[in-house]
Image (tube, rainbow, N blue to C red):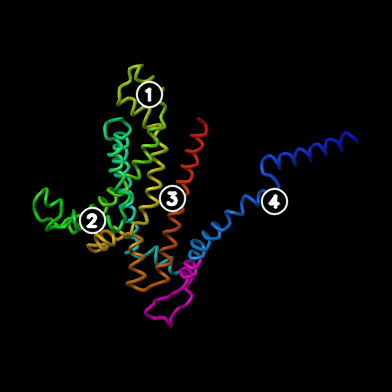
């Protein structure tokens, strides 16, 4: 009996010791959390309350041109969103726009990262110049490309190749994608450059000593090492680019027709041109859900990347 009581006492003491070691007392834990509460409350007020209001609005049949006819519509707005031909076209445009911009910017970003991973005179200046497009405001970048580069009368492209081609009207999707690639390639480059600089120099030197050439080292060592960095760049880029509005609004206005109308711009049109607030809210909820799905994969990639770094 004495032995049992002693064992229980030892166990309780061990639990208290573990609590003090790993988490501390409840007062200590709340002392650490208390400074973070204002930020948490601010995030909830700024993000979650508007989202709940959007969910509520998505269940209403509400056209601003008929304010007295507002009524509860249930899930009919979601059914209209998922079956509307314009929104389906906007969804396809969103996928094409996002995938094209992400893939091209990742490829170019990888090439630039490989360039900056080498030592050469003026590397710091070149790195600063390559990062500059990412620092330009999206609206300013779109205006720059629309007027200084694509303009048929005095644009840079027609000045170089001759002619008077209206690039925005002739190749609207390419025009928008090129603008996004110019702006987002530095973002991809920085992530991939960090991955390249995390390689083991000893391992690369051993491969060179064993007779491996640059191409074999790149395909068999660098690319496998860069896989998670490539995934991270692509997923984070997708989260940002799926929300593209500035370039579409400024360069093409979604046209010609609906050639470049993506989901954010279609939501804008539904709200401020059709004045269908309930339908626009439902479309916004669908976009948020899709973004959350992509963000979930991104967080998994980031967590696995951190686990890999901790295991080294």
Nearer the camera: disc 1 or disc 2: 2
Q: CA distance from mark 2 to mark 4?
A: 56 Å
Earlier-in-chain disc, 1 versus 3: 1
Q: Residue at x 61, y 52 (%)?
A: 33
- 246, 75: nearer the viewer: 246
Residue receiving disc 4? 27
Measured from the top left, where is residue 32 in percent x and y? Answer: 62, 49
Q: Which residues are magenta?
A: 52-75
As drawn, 109 above or below 157: above
**Which structural element holds mark 1?**
helix
Q: Earlier in the sequence, mark 4 or mark 1?
A: 4
Name the residue that disc number 2 marks: 144
Q: Which of the image's four quarters has the N terminus?
A: top right
Left or right, 261 with reference to 276: left
Q: Nearer the viewer, mark 4 or mark 3?
A: 4
Q: Position of residue 161 (x, y in %)?
A: 11, 48
Q: Are marks 2 and 4 in contact (CB under 8 Å)?
A: no
Q: Is disc 4 in contact with disc 1, using a CB cutoff of under 8 Å?
A: no
As drawn, the residue found furthest toward the left would be 163
Disc with the residue nearer the chain's start (3 vs 2): 2
For marks 1 and 3, give the one nearer the viewer.
1
Residue 59, how many percent across, how many down? 48, 70
Tell us which disc is closer to us: 2 or 4: 4
Q: Which residue position holds label 3?
A: 294
Q: Residue under circle 1? A: 204
Mark 3: secondary structure:
helix
The stretch drawn in magenta includes residue 66: yes
């Amino acid at each position: 009996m004495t032995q049992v009581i002693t064992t229980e006492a030892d166990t309780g003491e061990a639990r208290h010791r573990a609590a003090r070691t790993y988490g501390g007392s409840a007062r200590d834990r709340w002392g650490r959390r208390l400074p973070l509460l204002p930020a948490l409350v601010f995030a909830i007020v700024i993000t979650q309350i508007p989202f709940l209001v959007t969910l509520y609005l998505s269940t209403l049949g509400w056209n601003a041109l008929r304010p007295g006819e507002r009524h509860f519509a249930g899930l009919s707005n979601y059914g209209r969103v998922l079956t509307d031909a314009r929104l389906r076209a906007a969804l396809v445009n969103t996928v094409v726009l996002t995938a094209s911009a992400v893939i091209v910017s990742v490829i170019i970003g990888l090439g630039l990262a490989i360039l900056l991973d080498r030592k050469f005179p003026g590397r710091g200046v070149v790195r600063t110049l390559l990062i500059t497009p990412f620092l330009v405001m999206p609206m300013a970048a779109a205006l720059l490309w629309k007027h200084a580069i694509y303009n048929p009368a005095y644009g840079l492209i027609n000045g170089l190749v001759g002619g008077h081609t209206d690039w925005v009207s002739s190749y609207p999707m390419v025009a928008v994608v090129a603008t996004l690639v110019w702006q987002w390639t530095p973002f991809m480059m920085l992530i991939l450059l960090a991955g390249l600089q995390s390689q083991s120099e000893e391992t690369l030197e051993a491969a060179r000593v064993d007779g491996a050439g640059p191409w074999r080292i790149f395909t068999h060592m660098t690319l496998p090492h860069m896989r998670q960095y490539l995934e991270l760049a692509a997923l984070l880029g997708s989260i940002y680019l799926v929300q593209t509005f500035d370039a579409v609004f400024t360069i093409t206005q979604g046209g010609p027709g609906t050639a470049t109308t993506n989901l954010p711009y279609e939501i804008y049109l539904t709200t401020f041109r059709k004045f269908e607030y309930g339908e626009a809210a439902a479309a916004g909820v669908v976009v948020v859900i899709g973004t959350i799905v992509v963000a979930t994969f991104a967080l998994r990639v980031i967590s696995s990347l951190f686990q890999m770094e901790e295991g080294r």
